[in-house]
Structure formats: structure tokens, C-alpha cells
Image: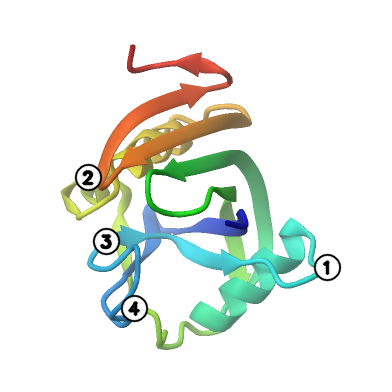
Amino acid sequence: MKEKLTTLCYIEKDGCYLMMHRISKENDVNRNKWIGVGGHFETGESPEECLLREVKEETGLTLTSFQFRGIITFSTDTFPAEYMCLYTADGFEGELTECTEGLLKWIPKDKIWDLNLWEGDRIFLKMLLEDAPFFSMKLHYVGESLSQVLIDGKDLIR
């Protein structure tokens, strides 16, 4: 199994994050979850090139200001490992367009906790909202249950 390289971005505007409700694809590991926008690297892309391309493809927006916030390692008992470059963005141009992967919606930051989120996403979203410095996080899932959380090499569950 080959590891995956991805980006994920939480675009900010007026106290909200742009969130995607993943409802469009049948065989989607994120089906019915709310996540940021992003996707898989294409051959030879840098993280920033992937971020800019994926955000444009999924939202129609062109980012003008963004920050690399952390690296997330996802491991599971069923899928190959995924290494995700996590970003926030507070500047963009263009008009929001419809997305083929899900429903895009601006969600007030204090209301994101009411959404159907992955358990690990709740941890890194809290860190983003607290303006934590750059971090490395490992999230290990067994099925959909989070079984291990490492932040900068320190185990948070045991």
C-alpha cells in the first residue's frame, strides 16, 4: 500500500470557516463528515501548489494569504497512511462556486463543534482556533474510532 500526500485548508471569513459536507461521492472515506477543502498531490507538486490548485478546483477561490499550520499523519487499520499538510487561509479572491465533492458552507467557528466531524479533526481544529504554533500530529484510527493521538511525539491518550 502506498502512502497518500494531501492538503487540507480551513478558509476564514467573518468569524467563519468554509466547511465541506462530504455527501456527493458514494465510496468516500469522509462520507457525511464535515471537513475543510483540499485534496491529493499530483506528481511533482509542492504542498503549496497542491493547496492552491485544490482550493481553486473545489471552491472557485484563489488564495492570496495562507499559513502552513501543521502536518497530520493519519494511520488506520484499513487504509494506507496519509500525510496531510494543514493550512488556514485568511485571504482570497473570486466567487464561491459549487463543488462536486460536497456542499460548501460558511460555518461560524463556535458552531463547528455541532457538525459531524472526525474525532481527530476536533483536536486539530481546537489547536487552530487557539492559534497553536506549527505542530506535528499523528492520529491512528481503528475503524472510525480514534485510538492514538501523538502531538509533537507525545502520546495524549495513554
Q: Where residue 72 appears, x then y in whole percent?
A: 54, 41
Where does label 3 land, which residue?
33
> Badge 1 local density, few (<14 within 10 Å), some, or many (20+)?
few
Which is more N-terminal, label 4 or label 1? 1
Q: Which residue is mark 4?
A: 102
Label 2 amino acid?
Answer: Trp
Provide residue 9's location: percent of width, then percent of height.
Answer: 53, 57
Query: Can you tell which mark lies on residue 12?
Result: none
Q: Check disc 1 and report the residue beneath it.
A: 44
> Disc 1 vs disc 4: which is toward the camera?
1
* Residue 36 placement: quadrant: bottom left
Neighbour tally class for label 2: few under 14, some 14-19, many 20 plus, Cα within 10 Å: few
Q: Which mark is residue 113?
A: 2
For residue 43, which quarter of the picture?
A: bottom right
Of circles 3 and 1, the one toward us is 1
How far apart in space, not on screen, are marks 3 and 2 (Cα)?
12 Å
Amino acid carrying label 4: it is Gly
Q: Amino acid at mark 3?
A: Lys
Q: Is residue 108 above or below residue 58?
A: above
| Secondary element at image label 4 | loop
Choose top left, top right, bottom left or bottom right for residue 158: top left
Verify CB contact (< 8 Å) between mark 3 and mark 1. no
